[in-house]
Amino acid sequence: MENIRFNVGRGQRLLLFVCVATLCLLVTAVLVYIIGTDTTPKARIGAVLQDVIAFAVPAVAVAVMVTRRPADLLMIHKPEPVAAMAMVMALLVAMPALNLLVEWNASLPQPESFRADAEAQHAMIEMLFGGTGIGSLVAALLIIGVMAPLTEEMLFRGCLQRLLQSIAGRSGAVWIAAAVFSFMHFDLTGFVPRMVLGVIFGYAMLWSGSLWTAVACHSINNCLAVTAMWLEMWGSAAGTELQTFGSTSLGLVALSVVVASGLAFVAYRHRRLIADRQ
């Protein structure tokens, strides 16, 4: 894996990841329970604690423990610009298809407990806003649109996906990490589209050579979702239109898939050309 020398074997690395991530998740759960989430300030503190302790800390801790080159493992490098731009554009172009996938997944027959969990998460996000003012939007964008993508990508792409590469191969690692990423959101009503997003983030990092590309894609997606939700809370139809953009036109959905696939192929080929030159 890019000539990274590890201090422990493959199985031990994954076991260490599971143990550290589980411990940090339990610590976060206890702290959030103690603090509570019944008010907007408490909900925001809980969200920040989750981002830092449950995601960032285990990613950095495991990277430091398994190798002397943690930054290389996490792929904290400058991205290859052409591949990075192509993947960001691919994400944006794919929005009609992704929106249709969201609607399809939500329409599937599911236990009421799944829908109850999804509604509880929606209510928690509304609590994070704390209102419909500009200040509420900015706070939500910072927590959900900036901080969460950074820390989640560190854990699921920078750490887990990279550790899985030596066992499942590059593409296998992308898909497994994406599935874990989606499952850990504990919202099965959106499992498939979230996993597809995780795949996009995974290949964005892989083909651009940098975690920052995955963070950028994740941040753009979250910021769009936050803005749409804020517009809905504000009473604007633009929020619903943003969430369903293009999903009612199968022709537009098909075009978005074709163009996004072409952009992804550009990123892939450009990365291969650079690798061949090296």
Image (spheres, grey):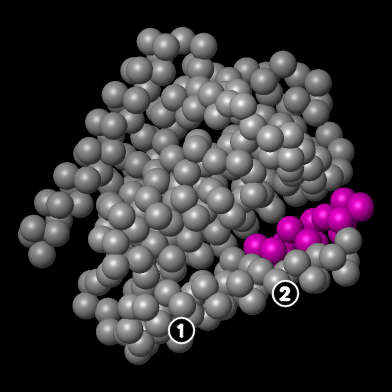
Hey, which quadrant is residue 108 in on the image?
top right
Q: Give the residue number, with chain letter if any, for mark 1.
A: 64
Hey, which quadrant is residue 236 in on the image?
top right
Distance from Cα at disc 1 to Cα at disc 2:
20 Å
> Between residues 59 and 134, which one lies in front from this camera angle?
59
Question: Element at badge 1?
Answer: helix
Quadrant showing the N terminus: bottom left
Residue at image point 72% right, 74% down: 27
Give percent across and percent down for residue 42. Answer: 87, 59
| Disc 1: CA contacts within 10 A as few (<14), some (14-19) or many (>=20) | some
Type of amino acid at the residue the image marks with label 2:
Val
Residue at image point 79% right, 71% down: 30
Q: Is residue 20 left or right of residue 251?
A: right
Type of amino acid at the residue the image marks with label 1:
Val
Instruction: Give the residues in magenta.
Output: 37-53
Give percent across and percent down for residue 47. Answer: 74, 58
Q: Is residue 100 magenta?
A: no
Quadrant showing the C terminus: bottom left
Q: In the rendered image of this protein, does residue 187 appear above or below residue 211? A: above
Q: How many marks?
A: 2
Which comes sooner in the sequence, label 1 or label 2?
A: 2
Residue at image point 46% right, 77% down: 15
Hey, which quadrant is residue 275 in on the image?
bottom left
Give percent across and percent down for residue 169. Answer: 25, 61
Q: In the rendered image of this protein, does residue 127 appear above or below residue 76? A: above
Q: In the rendered image of this protein, does residue 226 appear above or below residue 22? A: above
Q: Is residue 266 left or right of residue 156?
A: left
Q: Give the residue number, with chain letter if any, for mark 2.
A: 27
Can the viewer see residue 116?
yes
